[in-house]
Structures are given as structure tokens and as C-alpha cells.
Image (cartoon, rainbow, N blue to C red):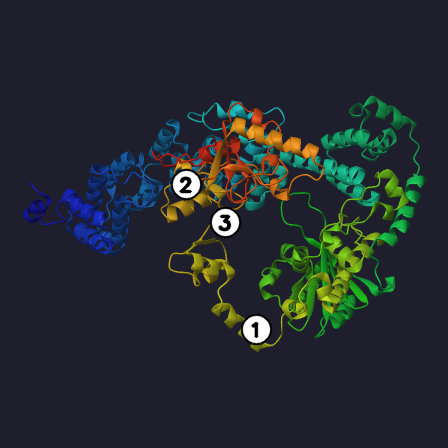
Amino acid sequence: MSQEGNSSDRPAGQDPLLLLNTLQLLWTKKEMKKLKEEIRRGFAGLEDPLAGLLDMLESSGDWKGKGHSLGYCISSELQLWMKEHPAVQQSGMKLKKLQARVFRILDQCPANLLDPLISIYQLHTADRNYLLGHVSHLYHRGDYKEAAILSIKLKLQSDQDVEKMCAPLLFQDKINLVEDYVGEHPELQCRLLQILDTWCEPDFNIRDMARQYQGLSRYKPDKLNRKMLSKLIFRLLERFNVDPALCPNVINQRHLRTLNYLFYKRFVEKTMTQENWTDHVQSTVGENRWLQGHLIQLLLRYCDLNAAARWAQRCNLPEEMLPSEVADELQKLEIQERVEETTKEENYKEVKKKDYYQLPIPRANIHLLQNWEDMMQCCEKVLQPGQIVGIDMEWRPSFGMVGKPRVSLLQLAVRDEVFLLDLPRLLEQAEVKGEKEKLPHIIQRLYSDAAITKLGYGMSGDLSSLAATCSTLKGMDKQSQSVVDLLTIDKLLQKSSIDWKKGSLKVDALPPEQSCEDEGLRQPEKGLSLLVQHVLGKPLDKTEQMSNWEKRPLREEQILYAASDAYCLLEVYEKLCKDPESFGLSSDLTESLVGKASVKPRAKKQLNKQEVPSPSGQIARQEGRVILTSGLPYQTLQSQVGEGRCFSVNCSEKAKEQALQVLKHFNVRVTLADIFSRCQVCNCDKYLKVPKERMRQLVEGSRNSLGDNSTGCPTSCEEKPGRTRGAAQPTGTTAGERLESTGSCGADVGLVGGTALQVAAIPPGVLDKAELTDFYCCTRCGKVFWEGSHFGRVVSQFQDILVTTGDEQRVYELS
């Protein structure tokens, strides 16, 4: 009997399976509005809607796949319908029988169907032991992800072993699910962190741990190495706001890396003063005997026995912990100051004055403000309409520890004066007086006043640290007006035609001591120091940058450094505004950088912003492209392109999850041929396939020609620094592509049309790999690719969504 005949013999909706047939037909036709109406009408006619839903789910298999299905649509509509008709809710023995049927379905249930079923059948009220037993059944079957998701939905975590539940998820790289599992349970968060910390012990074997779990053979436990675990632990410590002392292994390892870094900065780079280095070493090792022992070993490696013995004495290390030679030296050691070293360092400070930027104001005009009486003088001079203020901040280096740094010193520079605000003391005094919001109010007033021009370098990072110091200053970046970030100017300078990067100091400009000890080399200037060097002629002296800025009293060197960091902003800005064109900048630099206080120009600017699409919006509209973005730009860009042409990516997800979201949203079917189907440099999708032996001939010819010709080949043959060597899956090339020599230099091998193949960029040893048979050359830019391990890893990551296809790749081979 046909479906139509059945429907006419019996009122639709009385039989769940007849209702299902009707719904399936509407689902196939994608008549969603009519489908929802039919679902509600059908459930109203069923004698037992809850049992009817289970009849439909048990008789149909189309709800088992990923994504939205008919089963999900029916369940969600029933859930909404029940809110309007609470009388259909079941209880007692009848509900328990329905729950038993639901658990049989949950074995194959997709994640999106869990919430409706749990709500409809009140699974939270089921016997807890039965719920735990069902999760255990999934777990022992190797369905670790499904077991964890169901545990979270049913809130069973407090009755489960956190290591047993989370370990296999970590091996499967499902860290987000692990975070969700412990997210609402502080005791489980602490337990998880303790477990991960034990995995960081030197003698812990991660492979032995992985062998305990069924079905994890295809996952690589080596991915959970100590470096990755350390990053994960610190991220979780910060997210859950847990005391770092809970993880001694990873904290000790991080401190040890800090020690190695400090030794590198002091004895290899030679960019830290003795005072700063000593402060940081002492605070890093503290009373930890394990770290103190490593400190002695590092001192023996970088210094001498005398230095190791002095630190052993300072740390009061027992003799049995010391190497024999250090113990012997300690017995001979006489407590005395190393006058020679101190004198040498003082001489060095005097000599390098001529090589670095110096404050053009007297020391008396630098004011260290540590009480509220002094603050009045600062406010009167800084908070004046038309004032230009250089702003900088200092904080103690965190060396990658948990949490954002807290600002210890806020520097405000105006013409001929600098004010150094000791924030910890000022905030403490304000709290004692009951005026906790007084200082934040002054800072807010400064940043939000459009009549005052504020100068900084990398202001977003400074404001983030300021917000971490005082919670009332959060969102300051949105309130700020008339702010000039010289980092932006720095980037403009880098893009200008002037080759200012070559302005690094010459060897003959170095102090005699540094030329001798550092073999005539100085670390290249960077950041603000390099900008100051380019604009004012001399770089900033950054040796005090890594000071312990929380330690009081501040040393004179720290005070001068902090004042210089803020005051130099005024001089750089003034010189750039006077003659921007000499630095390769536009003549309207002042107007473009400083915001106006007037309301009308701001309103006009906002109007223009709405009328004129952004560059991304223009390109998308002209070329029919789709924009992928995240955060605030989404709202603006969405209004500039067609419907559905802008998609907001969740930037809190991992890159793979973001890619999967995009593919799912646009219903993209990915085949193996799509992996690396475009050149990573120029986005071209046409490659030339070159057999390995032919490529070997080209490479050898290139090297021979370079050896014979001192001028080398044209730059088009060479790979620029920073390009990524990777793998590319070949796609078809245009007919007629072939190799030819494009010039007198034999290394300049190219395609018809002038594209030079970058054969000289292939590293030694690649051609000797037995598994490689072919290379793929981009026909637009000449970049050479081959199937390396990176290709296999990417294919493995996306294996679960790849669609197999019989279409062959058409590639033109070389004869």
C-alpha cells in the first residue's frame, strides 16, 4: 500500500511511524516551515508523545550522522512543544522505562542530540549508578570522547577518576574537552594539574601511560612532550586561577629555563648589568635547593670557581651538595668586594654615555613620586589642555610565569620634566586612606582627554598590563583619545623607501671593553631603541630594561633609564612632525596621527567610514570573495559585502577546529587533491611536475654555475629568507609549460613566460631521500615543493573529513 493510501486510511499523527514517513518526505523537500508545523500537529495527536519520539528514533537511522538531522529537528521541536504542554511529562515507573530505552539509543547518539533527549526524558533524575555504568560501558569500548561528553551533560564528574577520564582525551588532542570536563569543579582542576605535573617528572614515560588505554595506537604520545605539557599546565593555571605551587615540577623546569636565559643575557649577549642579573638570579632560585644546585653548575660553566663559591656561600649550601672543587674553593674564600669588577663596570658606564641617547634635562627635573602630596605637582603639569605627554611603563620580567605582569612604575614625560609614579606605593596609600579610585581616575582622565596628546610605543601591551594592575582600568583602550603609538610610525618607516635598518652601530663605535670582550660585536638594536637611533642618531641604552622593578629603593641607573624611555618619545615625535618627508613619511603626518577634540570632524570621519568600504570589503565585492574574520571587524565587514559573504571564526579554537568550522559552514567537500593545492607564496593553483633525477640535474647545474660565475644568478632564482619549505599536492598545469634557460647564468632555469624556478633553494640532502620521486614547481613564482613529513601530518589531521574521489590529477611531466 502506498504512503498516501496509509495516510488517508488513518488520521495522520496517531501512528508515530506514519508521522515519521510524512516528516521524512518534508525533510527531503526541505520544506522546513511546514515540517515544524507537522511535527507539532503530529505530537498533539499522539497518545504518548515521549514514547512516540523513541519509536521514530529506533526505526530510523538518519539521525546517527554528524550535524543537524531529522532526528535532531524532531527532538528539538518536541522539547519546545513540551514547554507549552507540561502535562505530557512522565514520572514514576513509566518514566524509568522510557529512560531505559533512551540509554540504548545514546550508544550511537551524536552530541547535538544529547541535550534534547536529556531534557525530554529527565535523565538527570535517573539512578546515578546506572548513569555511571552506562558511561563506563562507553569508556571501556574505547569511546572516550563520547563518555566524557555524556559525563559533562549528566554532571557525573565528581564520581569519576579525573586521570582515567582525561588522559585518553589528552592523547587524542582533545584539550578543549578536558577543560570543559573540569571547568566547573575546582577540586578536579587541582587534581588534573597535579597529574599533569607528575607527567613532567624527568623519569616519567609517557608511552607507558598511553599503553593503558584501548584504541590509542594511531595517536602519538610523543606529542605530549614536556614542553607541550608545560605550556598546557601554565595555560590551565592561569585560566582556573590555581596556585602555581601545586605544580612544583613544571615550575622548577620553568625557573631552570629562566636561569639559563639569564646566563645567556649576562655572559653571551652581555646585555644585563651585574646588579640586574644578581637580583633576578636570587629571586629565581630562592630557597629551592634543586635550583641552587643547577645554579652552581651554570656558574662553573660560564664563570669560575670563585664565582661558584661566592654563590654557594650566599645560598648557604651544605658542603655535601657542592662539587669537590667548589667546596675546596669555599674553604679558601675570603669575604671581600671585587673592586676590579666594580671599577670596570663603572668605567664602562662612563664610556658608553657617548654611544647612547642621553636625557637633555637635568637630574633635578626627574621626580620619583611615592606619596600623594607630590602627585599634585604632576597633575597640574600633565593634565593641561594642549599638553603632549610621553608615557611608558615598567614591570618586573615574568619570564613566562603565570599571569600578566603588574606595572611597578608609570613614567609621564612633558617638556623639560619627567614624573615617575611608584604605582604600588601610591595605590597602597590610596587604599589606606579609603581613596582607592583616586589614582585610576587620574589615569583615566589623562587617557580620555582629547585635548592632551599621548605618546607611547606598543601602547596596547602597556594598557593590558595597566588593567592587570588595577581592575578599574580595564577597557581603557576603548576610552582613549588623541593617542599616538610610535610603534605604528615605526612600521611606516620600515615600509618607506629609505633603508634605515642598515643604520646599526659600527664596530669602531663600541667602547674598548666591549670590543675586546664581545669580539667587536654588539646585539643589533630593535624596537624603540632602533627607532630612536634612526630619528635622533643614537639608540637607547636598554641594559636596565630587565631590572627587578618591584625592588625598592630604585637604583639611580633605573631612574635614569625609566626617564629616558618616556622622554625620548617627545623628541622623536617632535622631529618626525617637523620634517616627516625626510624620513619617507607623508607630509600630513601630524593630522593623520593625532585625533581631534572637535565633535564635527569625528562625526564626519565616522560617516566616511560607513560610506567607504574597507580594503577587504572592496576586494571581496570586486572579486566575489568570502571574508573570514574574528572579533570586532566582523560587524563592520558584514555590512560591506553580500549576504553570507562574511564568516566570523572563533579565534579561541585551535587552527584545525577553525578550519573545520569554515568547511562545515560553507559545505565544502575536501578531497586529498585539495591539500596544498595552492602555492603558499603566491596562491597559484598550477604546478609543473618534475621527476627527481631531472631536478637533480637542474640543482647541480645551478650550483656549478654559481661556482663559476662570481656575480651569481638573478634574485628570482633564490628563495627569500623566511619562506616556508613544505609540501604541495600537485594540480594540473597549463599546456605547453616546459623548462628553458632564461639567461646566461645556468642556474636561472625557468618556464616559458619568464618564471624562474627556485632550484637553488632546495636544501642539501632532500634529493637523496628515497621516498621522494617528484617535485612540484609553481608556474607563477617558481617556488619548488615536495611531499615532506608536513604533508603527511596535515593529511592525518584532516583524515576524518577527507572525501575520496576517483578523479586523477592532470600533471604535465617533463620529457
Nearer-the-camera pick, 800 or 318: 800
* Rendered position, 24 above or below 364: above
Q: CA distance from mark 3 to mark 1?
A: 31 Å
The residue lying toward the viewer, choosing from 507 and 435, is 507
Please say whether residue 712 is visible from this viewpoint: yes
Classify residue 229 as left or right of residue 407: left
Q: Point out residue 140 in the picture as x, y percentages from the top left corner.
A: 38, 27
**Amino acid at pointer 1:** Arg
Q: Is residue 25 above or below residue 388?
A: above
For mark 2, does the 10 Å Cα neighbourhood hold few (<14), some (14 to 19), or many (20 or more) residues?
some
Task: Check disc 3 and report its element: helix, strand or loop.
Answer: loop
Single out the mark in the foreground, 1 or 2.
1
Q: Which residue is mark 2?
A: 152
Which structural element holds mark 2?
helix
User: Mark 2: which amino acid?
Assistant: Ile
Q: CA distance from mark 2 to mark 3?
A: 23 Å
In x, y percent, where is residue 96? 26, 38
- Quadrant in which the N terminus is drawn: top left
Residue 205, given in percent of the width and then of the height, sits at: 57, 24
Look at mark 3 in the image and give the residue it sits on.
651
Residue that badge 1 annotates: 602
